Amino acid sequence: MRREQYRMDRARALALLQRAPVVHLATTTPDGAPVLKTVHGVVVDDALCFHGAPAGEKSESLGRAAVLGAEEIVAEIPSYFVDPERACPATTYYESVQVHGVLEEVTDLDAKARVLGALMSRFQPEGGHVPITADHPMYKSAVKGILIVRVSLERLDGKGKLGQNRKPEELALILLRLWERGTPADLAAIERVREANPSVPPPAFLAAPDGVQLHMCRLTAADAARAADLLEGAYWNAGVSRETIERSHLGATVWVGARDQRGRLIASARANSDGAKHAWIYDVIVDPEWRGRGLARAVLRLLLAHPAIRHVRNVRLGTRDAQRLYQGLGFVVEAPRPHGWDLLLSR
Ligand SMILES: CC(C)(COP(=O)(O)OP(=O)(O)OC[C@H]1O[C@@H](n2cnc3c(N)ncnc32)[C@H](O)[C@@H]1OP(=O)(O)O)[C@@H](O)C(=O)NCCC(=O)NCCS
């Protein structure tokens, strides 16, 4: 790698390799002809492994040097994000990983079965098949016949080009432009650029009370479970199962949250939005230990400025007793309910 500032640590490089939908394999045949293939790779026994037909280019290349690579585009950065006239700053932020090594055949039948099992877990995680073992009558001959190739991960290199070459003020501008452009990929890019440049202060749109980080990407299953923990006992979810609460979070069009310094989710809110006419906010919750410090306000401001909500004409929510919180953000009472109020923000 030419520039150390872009080097990714081994754990991140490995994670990128493990989540790559496909891996590119470059090698040569014994007569020196170049070979480029796309394979499904899995990491087993500290090697990147893939399968193939017992005869063909992959088997011909056994014992030869190879490079395997995968990459993810994080964001296209147009030149005008940083310069109104010059084309030169146009670039792409990306993460990539490469493994250099030698193609080795896996011949041990149990090891072959483990690679095939790992491929099934990776690409058919829902299961629905008899587990693969070398001596199972259903798989015995297939395990024996198939070609399994490994390349040791000794030479694993990761590169993340995520704005590390930029001055803090330039990076702040790029983060703002990503937020303004606001595609789902841009929101994920904001998080990745910030992770790669931890000394850059949070941009104004992510301003939060001390010791708190705001987030606005799709939440993970673990976040949904933690949101369900926080929402336990909330009056509006009485009779709603935990599983339904988790699924409603994973299915929401917009989610925002806040984490403490240990990365624990301490506030959460979600909304369903058509992006233009109507949005409805649900499940605004702050960890009891963190209440009264402006966290709900920070999370709601972020939610209202979120690209999927910022241009919506009517944003609504129902509440029993927290009108003052929402009135401070511009909501007015639209209609009384038997046990509360519907609030509306019109713009
Ligand atoms: C309501 C809740 C989200 C507020 O979180 P918070 O982080 O403590 O709120 P903030 O510190 O950001 O408060 C911002 C403003 O809203 C006001 N506020 C907060 N909670 C309020 C409540 N329950 N009723 C009326 N006003 C409230 C605060 O006084 C503050 O106003 P101020 O600056 O004029 O003093 C939190 O108490 C909670 O999770 N409660 C349980 C779940 C809930 O009721 N959710 C709302 C459902 S609509």
Image: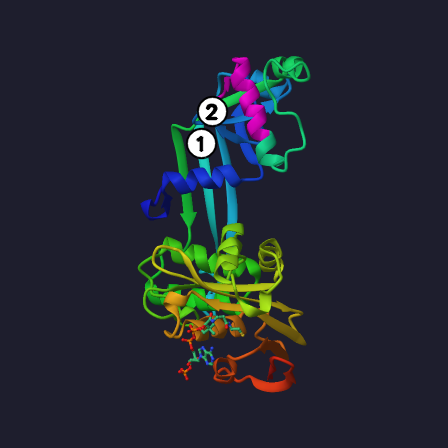
User: Label 2's element?
Assistant: strand
Q: What residue type is labelled 1?
A: Val
Q: In which quarter of the image is the C terminus?
A: bottom right
Answer yes or no: is residue 149 visible.
yes
Marks 1 and 2, how far apart at CA: 8 Å
Residue drawn at (57%, 35%) of the image: 122
Q: Quadrant of ligand 1?
A: bottom left
Residue 113 sits inside the magenta stretch: yes
Judging depth in this view, the residue of 196 and 265 nearest the camera is 265
Q: Residue 112 carries which label?
A: none
Q: Do the residues labelled 1 and 2 touch (CB within 8 Å)?
A: yes
Q: Residue 326 appears at what percent x and percent y?
A: 51, 81
Q: Residue 99 carries which label?
A: 1
Q: Residues within 10 Å of mark 2 (few under 14, many from 20)?
A: many
Q: Is residue 150 left or right of residue 273?
A: left
- Give the prevailing secondary structure in the magenta stretch: helix
Question: Which comes before the other along the chain, label 1 or label 2?
Answer: 1
Q: Magenta region: which residues?
A: 102-119
Ligand 1 under 8 Å from disc 2 Cβ: no
Q: Mark 2 points at which residue?
A: 151
Q: Which amino acid does label 2 sit on?
A: Val
